[in-house]
């Protein structure tokens, strides 16, 4: 009688995709706007002495300062929490 294979040795039938062709999809021009890369390259490659993370003006400054404030505040909070945790509880 011998051993019979557990798994079928025949290859399964190919699965045919049901996705639509690109020509069947609705045309959207939202992602086909003007290429902004050359304009951004001019901004970021300008030799004005500013770091890259501050080149775009006020929005970048606000994000940078908010990040720094949260970082410093979080560090202080962690240090205070460690100090409070290191003190013995009074009975």
Image (cartoon, rainbow, N blue to C red):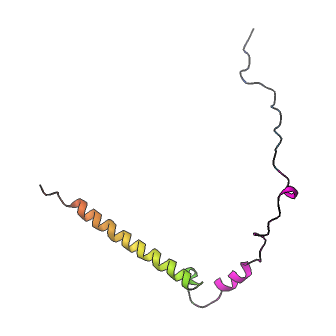
Towards the viewer: 23 or 74: 23
Q: Residue furthest right?
A: 23
Residue 36 placement (x, y as % from top left): 73, 78
Q: Quadrant of the N terminus?
A: top right
Towards the viewer: 5 or 23: 23
- Left of 27 or right of it: where is 72? left
Q: Residue furthest top?
A: 1
Q: Quadrant of the C terminus?
A: bottom left
Residue 18 placement (x, y as % from top left): 82, 45
Q: Residue furthest front?
A: 26
Residue 67 placement (x, y as % from top left): 46, 74
Quarter of the view holding residue 23: bottom right
**Residue positioned 65% across, 88% down in the render:** 46
**Residue positioned 17% across, 58% down in the render:** 88
Residue 25 placement (x, y as % from top left): 83, 57
In magenta, the rendered stretch is: 20-48
Q: Is residue 73 above or below residue 2?
A: below
Q: Is residue 16 above or below residue 26?
A: above
Q: How many marks?
A: 0
Q: Residue furthest left?
A: 91
Q: Residue 40 magenta-drawn?
A: yes
- Left of 86 or right of it: where is 51? right
Name the chief secondary structure element in magenta.
loop
**Residue positioned 76% across, 69% down in the render:** 30
**Residue positioned 50% across, 81% down in the render:** 62
Towards the viewer: 24 or 4: 24
Q: Residue 53 magenta-drawn?
A: no
């Amino acid at each position: 009688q011998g051993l019979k294979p557990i798994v079928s040795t025949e290859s399964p039938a190919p699965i045919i995709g049901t996705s639509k062709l690109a020509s069947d999809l609705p045309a959207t021009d939202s992602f086909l706007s003007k290429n902004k890369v050359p304009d951004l390259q001019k901004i970021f490659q300008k030799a004005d002495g500013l770091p890259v993370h501050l080149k775009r003006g006020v929005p970048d400054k606000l994000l940078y300062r908010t990040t720094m404030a949260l970082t410093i505040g979080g560090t202080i909070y962690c240090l205070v929490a460690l100090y409070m945790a290191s003190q013995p509880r009074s009975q």
